[in-house]
Image (cartoon, rainbow, N blue to C red):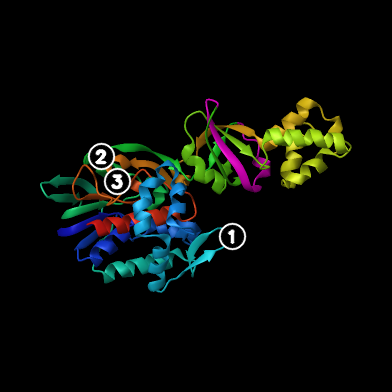
Amino acid sequence: MKFDLIVIGAGPGGIFTALEAASRGLKVAILEKNKRIGSKILVAGSGKCNLTHSGKPKEFLDKYGENGKFLKVALNKFSPDKLKDFFKEKGLPLVLVEESGKYFPNTFSSLDVVNLLNNELLKKGVKLFFNVVIENIEKNEELFFIKSKDIEFSCDKLMIATGGKSYPGTGTTGEGYIFAKKLGHKIIPPQPALAPIFIKDYKFSELSGISFPQAIISFWKKDIKIIEKKGPILFTHTNLSGPGILDNSRYVEHDTKIEINYIYEKYEYALKKFIEEVNINGKQSIKKYLSQYILPERFLKFTLQLLEVKDETKIAEISKLKREEILKYISSNKLEITKVAGFENAMVTKGGVSLEEINSKTMESKIVENLYFAGEVIDIDGDTGGYNIQGACSMGVLAGRSM
């Protein structure tokens, strides 16, 4: 069965590639291993479908780590505003949740998004093939040949948009890397990203549910600071989570340590201020003094107990060593990371098809003519908050136009 374009994978990148290409007159088919399109869209935003974020395209670029600049052309061609316009024109406007900056469909339903996209594909004449398990892909002269168990397809242009390895229950189990490698592409080893972080000798189980709206998070390797970021963190029963942790889990490597500043004040300044306060009002209790930092009550009590300091101890009575311990714990708490949660708990995948081998102005392979990539299958991953869906849609539109 012959088509101008075959898209492998019916996630946001593949869907928007197909819509754009079909609207420009190409005969398009999507091959999907699941029984419907958009399996991962359905779980986005806990089923409410966070599609994009507030901010201009240039503000988006540093939300994708070190590889963000790769998306400059794609985000300019199909910006967050254009994605919002797309859904508004189709009768499903997006609404902003002010405190988070996230945009959702006004029904807060992922199913509504998937149904709308399915209808648009059918209107554009895109042929949808479900439950397709691909066994082999080859390129022979000008055509690609895709062989499945039941049928063989051929096409002039091929888009691989199979996703990564995160949330394998939705079908993203890494086949795209196999296809890309067979066609000559280098694969950056896939790793879980947007995932919780596990800590050696984790002590915060009893503080599960406590969050810090804006902590300073640093990652260290061999006593060298890799990067410093700011964001919300959350203690769970077993690990560190929250957007500040999830967004920056991409920086975790072997033997990486994390340092958390809960009080938004550097240790040296906090220590200097403490000493000054001892000279002014040394009779106040340590608990009262630390209350200026608006730390959660349970965390403050836990910290003092851990460091064997009684709540009502006068700050003038606290030894030099002990005050340094207290202030280091709340302003530069360095913890050893044992691992990042696995793919089953990761929202996205770090790694994938090397960006060096993809033209960022077209999404076409630099190695194989008429081969394209979009979405999580390539080596780019965004922060939580709609950045990954927006990036995939923008890449898809850019590819479709380039064809």
Residue 288 colored magenta?
no
Give the structural element (helix, strand or loop) at label 1.
loop
Please name the residue shown 19% across and 54% down the image. Answer: 157
> Which one is in front, 156 or 45?
156
Which residues are the magenta region?
A: 201-223
Image point (43%, 43%), residue name: 343
Question: Residue 68, relative to residue 203: is it above or below?
Answer: below
Residue 156 in which image quadrant: bottom left
Q: x%, y% of residue 142? A: 11, 50
* Cα–Cα span, label 1 and label 3: 36 Å
Q: Quadrant of residue 257?
A: top right
| Number of marks in the rendered image | 3
Left or right of 258, for residue 25: left
Q: Is residue 129 above or below residue 352?
A: below
The amino acid on which the numbered mark 3 sits, given as a three-letter code, is Gly
Q: Which residue is mark 2?
A: 185
Count residues near mark 3 (Cα–Cα under 10 Å), then give few for <14, some for 14-19, many for 20+: many
Indicate the position of residue 85 as horizontal and vertical percent values: 40, 68
The reply to whether residue 314 is visible in this rendering is: no
Q: Secondary structure at mark 3?
A: helix
Choose mark 2 or mark 3, whichever is in front: 2
In the picture as drawn, the residue positioned furthest to the left comes out as 141
- How many angstroms separate mark 2 from mark 3 (CA)? 11 Å
Q: Position of residue 328 (x, y in %)?
A: 69, 32
Which label is found at residue 99? 1
Q: Earlier in the sequence, mark 1 or mark 2?
A: 1
- Residue under label 3: 176
Return the mark for residue 135.
none
**Amino acid on which the number 1 mark rests in the picture:** Glu
Q: Is residue 365 shown to the viewer in this render?
A: yes
Horizontal side, residue 146 vs residue 294: left or right:
left
